[in-house]
Image (cartoon, grey):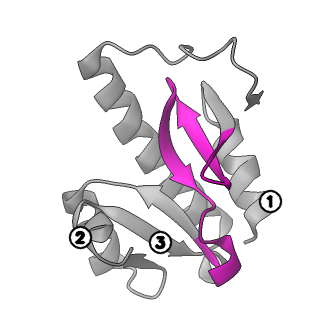
Amino acid sequence: MTAKDFQRIALSLDGVEEGSHMGAVDFRVGGRIFATLASVKQGYGNLMLTPEVQAEFLAERPDLFLPIHGGWGKMGMTYIRLAEADEDSLRGALHSAWKLRMDKNKKSGKSAGRRAGKAAKSR
């Protein structure tokens, strides 16, 4: 898969907007990031998971997923190797990150369309 595939799949999820954080493309729901292409030059997409979900992904597909280095990885931030991913695994991983963010947004009272008026690309 490619960065364009990552983008296409991320933007197909409900309420997702494309933005930019520190010069890197990111994908947000309710104004909060759930995935980025910050490491695309190294061949990775970045997923914001929980440590528990990250551990499941690593156990199931160590060829496809690896923790981001340092403290970010310990918090669940995870690389997906784009060249190794197929459509189903990339879609499933992005959906998991999106769902975790949606659930977190619901708990904190943030709606999916919070930034709808902001100049960010949407689906």
Asked where in the image residue 13 lies, by quadrant, the reply is top right
> Label 3's element?
strand
| 42 horizontally vs 92: left or right | right
Q: CA distance from mark 3 to mark 1?
A: 16 Å
Label 2 belongs to which residue? 55
- The residue carrying pointer 3 sits among few (fewer than 14), some (14 to 19) or many (20 or more) residues within 10 Å by Cα, namely many
Residue 107 versus residue 53: which sits nearer the camera? Answer: 107
Helix, strand or loop at disc 1?
Answer: helix
Q: Which residues are magenta?
A: 19-44
- Looking at the rendered structure, the kind of residue marked 1 is Lys
Tell me, yes or no, whether the highlighted magenta stretch contains residue 62: no
| First-in-chain label (3 vs 1) | 1
Q: Are marks 3 and 1 in contact (CB under 8 Å)?
A: no
Residue at the image position 70 percent from the left and 78 percent from the top: 41
State the quadrant of the C terminus. top right
* Horizontal side of residue 64 vs 17, given as left or right: left
Residue for badge 1: 4
User: Residue 37 location in percent, x, y?
Assistant: 63, 61
